[in-house]
């Protein structure tokens, strides 16, 4: 069974384009056209990653991420903002709410695919090195067959690794649900370095 990604955007073209690309890449995709629909799907489907726009009717992406992060079960869910809102203030707001990546539109599908793979690999590593991750999220740890070949190889390659003191600090903060920006601020690093 493939990993599931929730794509949230009020623009049908974006939902279809991103959804089709991710399905071709081997993921299962569920789609919502606003934040309220997304919350309903999150509860029912428990996706492994969420990609969301910001400007949407009924509930915007900021409110969606705020609600997602307020629920313990979804504190560590990887979240990507995919949006035309590109000002520094908007990006900072997104990171402060807990998004992992803020990708401006227009974007390139291969870049989005690389980001998705990277975030899912990180989630798999966290799930493997932290028994409390799965207990905390109450989501059963997926077997290796759930991951694409690249993710599986990464998990195997990283199963027994030595971490530097800084890497241990980053991992500890990740396990506590902090975003890349929050970790960067706390450790005096660029959020890009944390990624």
Image: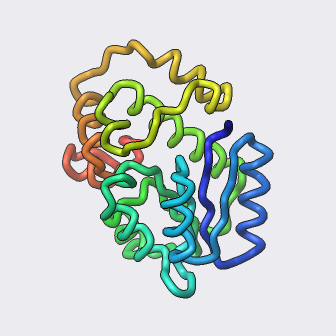
Which quarter of the image is occupied by the C terminus?
top left
Q: Residue 13 placed where, x, y %? A: 77, 72
Q: Residue 189 placed where, x, y %? A: 28, 45
In this image, 84 relative to 130: left or right?
right
In this image, 97 relative to 15: left or right?
left
- Say which residue appears at 21% left-offset and 43% top-offset: 187
21 vs 81: above or below: above
Q: In the picture, residue 103 is in which quadrant? A: bottom right
Q: Residue 132 placed where, x, y %? A: 29, 34
- Say which residue appears at 32% left-offset and 14% top-offset: 162
Q: In the picture, residue 67 is in which quadrant? A: bottom left
140 vs 41: above or below: above
- Say which residue appears at 39% left-offset and 12% top-offset: 160
In this image, 10 relative to 165: left or right?
right
**From this viewpoint, which residue is outermost toward the bottom?**
57
Q: Residue 20 placed where, x, y %? A: 79, 56
Task: Name the colouring of the figure.
Answer: rainbow
- Say which residue appears at 44% left-offset and 72% top-offset: 64
Q: Which is more toward the observer, 54 or 142?
A: 142
Which quarter of the image is occupied by the N terminus?
top right
């Amino acid at each position: 069974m493939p990993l599931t990604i929730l794509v949230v955007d009020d623009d049908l073209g974006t939902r279809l384009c991103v959804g089709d690309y991710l399905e071709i890449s081997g993921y299962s995709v569920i789609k919502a056209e606003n934040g309220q629909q997304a919350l309903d799907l999150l509860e029912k489907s428990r996706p492994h990653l969420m990609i969301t726009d910001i400007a949407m009717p009924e509930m915007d992406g900021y409110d969606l991420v705020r609600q997602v992060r307020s629920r313990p079960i979804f504190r560590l869910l990887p979240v990507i903002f995919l949006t035309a809102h590109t000002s520094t203030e908007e990006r900072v707001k997104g990171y402060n709410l807990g998004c992992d990546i803020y990708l401006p539109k227009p974007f390139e599908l291969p870049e989005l695919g690389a980001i998705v793979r990277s975030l899912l690999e990180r989630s798999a590593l966290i799930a493997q090195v932290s028994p409390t991750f799965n207990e905390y999220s109450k989501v059963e740890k997926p077997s290796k067959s759930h991951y694409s070949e690249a993710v599986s190889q990464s998990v195997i390659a990283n199963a027994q690794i030595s971490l530097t003191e800084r890497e241990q600090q980053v991992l500890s903060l990740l396990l506590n649900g902090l975003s890349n920006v929050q970790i960067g601020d706390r450790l005096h690093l660029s959020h890009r370095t944390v990624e």
